[in-house]
Image (spheres, rainbow, N blue to C red):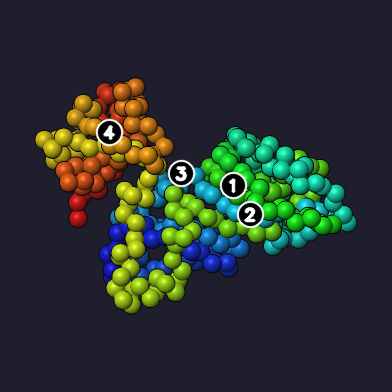
Amino acid sequence: MNQFDGVLAVHKPAGFTSHDVVAKVRRLVRMKRIGHTGTLDPAVTGVLPLCLGRSTRIVEYLQEMPKEYEATLRFGIATDTEDLTGEIIEQVDEVQLTEEQVHTALQSMIGTISQVPPMYSAVKVDGKRLYELAREGKTVERKAREVTIYSLEMTGWKPGTHPEVSFRVLCSKGTYIRTLCVDVGRALHVPSTMVELVRTQSAGIRLDQCLTFEQIEALMETGELEQHLIPADQAMSGLPSFTVDEALYRSTLQGKKIDKRYIHPVEDASATVTNQQLDKGSIGLFKLYGPEEIFIGIFREDEQTGQIAPVKVFLPA
């Protein structure tokens, strides 16, 4: 068995569930310890970061980071799955919308919005997946939940009796783009459904960084796959970085708490939390490094003592 450690960016093809991708990659790289960072529907393609080896310990952090998608929705029909894989439940002969009206509706979705998860989703209600209930012909009440649309850009417009609009969206974890498509139609008082969806970014990893199954297999044959893995700390680009004084380095490796005066911010333009927050008494989660930029692990400030406490320590290989 191989002992890879890092994040493998996979270009998920259509027809595979996220679990199918994990199973396929397990066979290709000949190792069991692999976890994915966010479920994608079988019809959806695009970025699916897989955590290999001890990097599976950062799955929960990568899942929390924003995702970017490119989607196409069609006006004039609605389906039970909110995309073209489902049965049509509503249809109109012709939709009369202008590009400007659609643009305005898309812009109205930016910000924190409330979504009701679709019945065909992996959300659990009373211990059962919603899609399992949906396949049994059941519909149950779902609690609405808040998600955030950080940006939404219209990228294409195709007029006709059933016009289509394409858009790019950056959103928070848990956002259903299918439901967003339905909500856009609802705002315009017409049925709508999602036609196509590609995830173009997840956890800061872009589509052009991803490898296909064929490329992974070829790199395994040449022994070059390890060079294409993203180190765990680099994958958590959204967390700010700090260094610890060399005298306290061993203490942090042993999981001991230390005074925060012994750590120092590293300027990192990609971090979503500013390093200046250290002086404000709360820095949340951050990455800690030792001498020679050795990644120690994920730490946080203890709210009760004000000390720096370990969350997950990564002992140097």
Q: Are marks 2 and 3 in contact (CB under 8 Å)?
A: no
- Which is more toward the observer, 43 or 197? 197
Instruction: Please give the label number shown on residue 169.
Output: 1
- Check disc 4 and report the residue beneath it: 265
Tell me what residue is drawn at x 31 percent, y 33 percent: 300
Is 140 placed left or right of 254 in the picture? right
Tell me what residue is drawn at x 15 percent, y 39 percent: 249
The image shows residue 171 at horizontal and vertical percentages of 55, 43
Q: CA distance from mark 3 to mark 1?
A: 16 Å
- Check disc 2 and report the residue beneath it: 71
Q: CA distance from mark 2 to mark 3?
A: 21 Å
**Residue type pointed to by label 4:** Pro
Q: CA distance from mark 1 to mark 2?
A: 8 Å
Q: Quadrant of residue 221?
A: bottom left
- The local secondary structure at tag 2 comes to strand
The image shows residue 135 at horizontal and vertical percentages of 68, 59
Q: Are marks 1 and 2 in contact (CB under 8 Å)?
A: yes
Q: Is residue 79 visible?
A: no
- Check disc 3 and report the residue beneath it: 64
**Residue type pointed to by label 2:** Ala
